[in-house]
Image: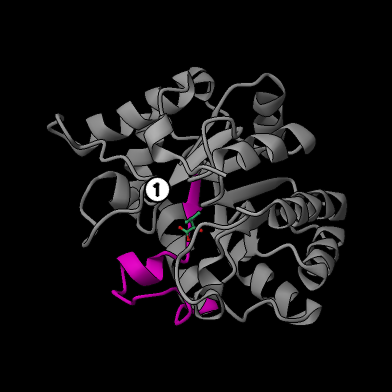
Amino acid sequence: MSYLQGDKPISITRLLAMHAEREKITMLTAYDSTMSALLNRCGIETILIGDSMGNVIQGHSCTTPVTVEQMVYHTECVVRANTHAFLITDLPFASYGDPVQALKSAAAVMKAGADMVKIEGGGDWQVEIIRYLVERAVPVCAHLGLLPQSVHLLGGYKVQGKSKDAATIMLEQALACQEAGAQMVVLEAIPSSLGARITSEVHIPTIGIGAGPDCSGQVLVLQDMLGISPGKPPKFVKNFMEGRHSVEAAIKAYVREVKSGKFPGLEHGFAG
Ligand code: KIV
């Protein structure tokens, strides 16, 4: 919990240094001020204002209804209580289909206080969007593996990168996103072995969610790790409220377990 030793906000430079020093990076989602303040108190280094907001706040079954205006609103809510954490905001579905639209969407969430934007996918067109944004001073986190914004195309929430060919393509996409200027990549629902392989081949931090223990850091949806999301949780989720009496204790346990490598365990990962 190095940043708690000083007052400085976490910068991308600090996150890259942590990655170089092999210190695990902690990330959780938040969408409001109360949780933003709590995550800061508990030592979380990065907060993701995720478009999972569409599921957990708005009650949709997917993230596609979420708008840029809503991401701006929730970013502003998180920013007001943020003291230290590095803030990443999702650009929602169909808000970065071409470079001009992507810059307009990114500018809106950056002006609201985001430190970085996240976009889903590593195909040729997304790589060009990343390059365009980075050249215009917008820091970008890529997102590969299971892409929730593509759920209708994928036919459901399924583990990605299981075949040899799919794994090779994903590794190539991670390298292409990095080459285009992405400074971080989220890897969602892929075999643990592929999470390890991508992490060893790129030099930017990888943040796993169902991508095994070898990623540079971990992220979960806050409501999932508190065990309050309705329905059966995905395999990669651990309920940190179990055996604890406060939300603060649960979040602090998450920070400890990510830092020590205890979370994620083998049981939270996928085989190749
Ligand atoms: O929107 C979100 O919360 C995300 C995580 C699942 C990584 O993108």
Task: Tell whether position 64 is magenta.
Answer: yes
Q: Main secondary structure of the magenta part?
A: loop
Q: Residue type at mark 1: give it.
A: Ala
Percent across and percent down for residue 205 are 68, 37
Which scheme is used to colour this image of the protein?
one colour
Compared across the picture, whether 231 is left or right of 23 comes to left
Looking at the image, which is closer to me, 265 or 32? 265
Q: The C terminus is located in which quarter?
A: top right
Percent across and percent down for residue 44 are 44, 35
Looking at the image, which is closer to me, 108 or 199? 199
State the image quarter where residue 78 is shown.
Answer: bottom left
Please tell me which residue is depicted at 50% across the width and 17% down the height of the picture.
5
Residue 263 is at least partly visible in this image: yes
Percent across and percent down for residue 208 are 54, 43
Tag 1 residue: 81
Residue 34 is at least partly visible in this image: no
User: Relative to 205, is 172 above or below?
Assistant: below
Please tell me which residue is depicted at 79% across the width and 55% down the height of the picture.
177
Label 1: how many residues lie within 10 Å, few (<14), some (14-19) or many (20+)?
Answer: some
Please tell me which residue is depicted at 31% across the width and 27% down the height of the picture.
253
Region rendered in magenta: 47-68
Residue behind label 1 places its C-beta within 8 angstroms of ligand 1: no
Percent across and percent down for residue 148 are 50, 67
